[in-house]
Image (tube, helix red, strand yellow):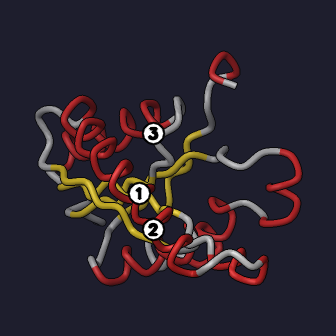
Amino acid sequence: MPEFKKIICALDLSDQSKQVAEYAAMVAKLSGASIIAVYAAPTLTQYTGFHVPPNTIDNFVGEIVSGAEQSMADFVAENFQGVNARGMVVVGYAAEEILKLSEVEKADLIVMGTRGRKGLDLILFGSVAEKVVKSAKCPVLTIRPDDADL
């Protein structure tokens, strides 16, 4: 019978993230698993061709990461009480970073939301959840937000 010892909980720190965290925490409590909550900050390297100095982009990404690390620490403290959980901020394309982390950490389950990008971003970049579901080597639990949260 499969066991859950380590869960990757992929978050975008939006309002939907609380729902995703609730499911991850429930599974962790039922199975005794630990949680690694992860947020993937964008690299913004696609803007280096627009005559924006690379050091300016690097500084901006650094500020995003610093802010995200504090937001993640607050989020984990508030939403994963009673669970062995830690937060992590990575830089890169979300689907790739989630998949890489799940392999490095030998995750037994990935929990993530189905909605993050909207409109043109979704058409251009596709669904992060779809890419993770198609490529993950472990089960993926996707959480669709309540219509009230949209």
Q: Which amino acid lies under the numbered mark 2 shown in the image of this protein? A: Asn
The answer to whether residue 68 is left or right of residue 29 is: right
The residue at which mark 3 appears reads as 20
Which comes before the other along the chain, label 3 or label 2? 3
> Regarding mark 2 in the picture, which secondary structure is present there?
helix
Quarter of the image where the N terminus is located = bottom left
Task: Quote the CA–CA distance across marks 3 and 1.
Answer: 25 Å
Q: Which amino acid lies under the numbered mark 1 shown in the image of this protein? A: Glu
Q: Which residue is drawn at 62% across and 71% down?
A: 44
Q: Residues within 10 Å of mark 2 (few under 14, many from 20)?
A: few
The residue at which mark 1 appears reads as 63
The answer to whether residue 23 is left or right of residue 53 is: left
Residue 48 rendering spot, x and y as whole percentages: 69, 81
Q: Which residue is drawn at 33% across and 55% down?
A: 66
Task: Quote the CA–CA distance across marks 3 and 2.
Answer: 30 Å
The residue at which mark 2 appears reads as 59
Q: Residue at x 50, y 60 (%)?
A: 140
Q: Which of marks 3 and 2 is in front?
A: 2
**Tally of numbered tags:** 3
> Regarding mark 3 in the picture, which secondary structure is present there?
helix
Q: Which amino acid lies under the numbered mark 3 shown in the image of this protein? A: Val
The answer to whether residue 112 is left or right of residue 77 is: right
